[in-house]
Amino acid sequence: MVPVRMGTSARRTDRRGPAGTRIEGDPMGAWDIGHFDNDTAADFGGRVDDAEAEKKADVLRDVLSSVAGTGPEEYVDGGEEAVAAAALVAAQCPGGDPVTTPYGPKNPLPPLPADLRPLAVRALDRLTAKNVEPLDLWADAGADQEWLAGIAALRAVLAAA
C-alpha cells in the first residue's frame, strides 16, 4: 500500500502501485518508499536540474529551510522535497548513498556547502515529529516504520559528516 495525497495536480490521474496494483484517481502520490519515489520529489529533481550550477545549493537550502523552520504546532503540508534535498546532500557525505534513481536529478550536482548538512538534519528531525503530512500518510498505509528507517539512515549519514 502506498500513501496517496489527493490534490489538484493534473500530472498523473492513474498509476500502478506495488505489484501492479492500480491506484485510481491518484493526482499526486507515491509509487514506492524511496526518497524520490513520488511526484513531488520527482518534480523537485527536475527543478534542481533546471537551476544553474551556482544556484543548485540555494534550491536545496530553500526547501530544507522551509521545513526546518516550521514550528512544532504547525502542520507540515508536504515535505517530500525536503527528504529529496536531504538525500542529495547526504549523497555527498562520507558513507552517503548516491542518488541513482531515474526520478532524481539527471545531472550531477556541484560540491554542496557543508552548512547544508545540519540544515538537512533539522529538516529531517521536523519530518519525524508530529503534525507532518508524509508521516501521517505513511502511517495510514502501514509503512511508517519503513519510511522512518529511511529517514533515520539519511540523518545518520548527515549527522556523522
Image: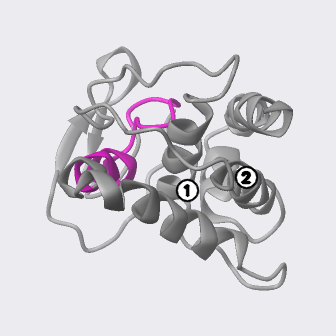
Among numbered discs 2 and 1, the one appearing first in the sequence: 1
The residue lying at 83 percent from left, 61 percent from top is: 129
Which residue is nearer to you in this view: 148 or 104? 104
Residue 100 percent location from the top left of the image: 37, 19
Residue 143 percent location from the top left of the image: 67, 34
Residue of label 2 = 124
Rate crowding at label 1 as few (under 14), some (14 to 19) or many (20 or more) other CA atoms within 10 Å: many
- Choose top left, top right, bottom left or bottom right for residue 70: bottom right
The residue lying at 68 percent from left, 55 percent from top is: 115
Residue of label 1 = 82
Rate crowding at label 2 as few (under 14), some (14 to 19) or many (20 or more) other CA atoms within 10 Å: many
The amino acid type of the residue labelled 2 equals: Leu
- Number of labels in the image equals 2
Residue 63 percent location from the top left of the image: 51, 66
Helix, strand or loop under label 2 = helix
In the rendered structure, which segment of residues is drawn in magenta? Answer: 31-47
Q: Is residue 49 left or right of residue 138?
A: left
Question: Is residue 63 shown above or below 105?
Answer: below
